[in-house]
Image (cartoon, helix red, strand yellow):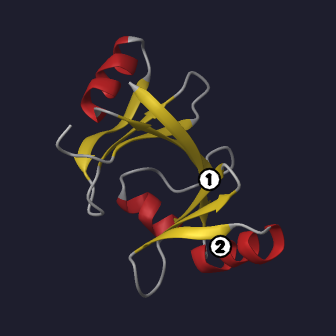
Amino acid sequence: MFSSSMPNLYSADVSAAARFYAEQLGFSQTFQYPPTGTARHVELRLGDSMLAITSHTAVHEAGLPAPSPGHTQELVVWCDDVDAAVARVRSAGAAVLVEPYDHVAGHRRAYVADPDGNWLAFVQSNLSS
């Protein structure tokens, strides 16, 4: 059901954060949304590791509370079926923070919390699945 994961840091300045990871640590940018203009979300790669950076505004627009101490990032987990994944963790007692929805970037997404309250974003990249 689940296939991979990626930490997603929340940032007040996505471009500055992406530059830091690229210039100081050697990450390469592999994705930006929107594709042109001010970045609201970027994805970077270093070897086999991936890292995402998302703007505070985009976090708020996704329906989550403002980033705060203890909630400065999320773990993105790709899955075959977001709705089934949410149903699975809900039945195990996990809190659902944002119900599944079709994201403007073309994928399906939902947010849940693990037992410690850490946020996880479930993402289904192929909406026909």
92 and 122: which one is in front? Answer: 122
Quadrant of res 83: top left
Instruction: Give the residue drawn at x 69%, y 49%.
Output: 69
Q: Is residue 93 above or below residue 100?
A: above
- Per the rendering, the mark at residue 9 is none
The residue where tag 2 is placed is 18
- The residue drawn where x is 41% and y is 85% is 36
At horizontal 62% and vertical 55% (from top left) the residue drawn is 51
Three-letter residue code for mark 1: Met
Mark 1: give few (<14), some (14-19) or many (20+) Cα within 10 Å.
some
Name the residue tied to disc 1.
50
The Cα–Cα distance between marks 1 and 2, rounded to whole angstroms, is 12 Å
89 over 123 or under it: above or below: above
Element assignment for label 2: helix
- Label 2: few (<14), some (14–19) or many (≥20) C-alpha neighbours in 10 Å: many
The x and y percentages for residue 73 are 61, 50
Looking at this rendering, what residue extends furthest in the left direction? Answer: 128
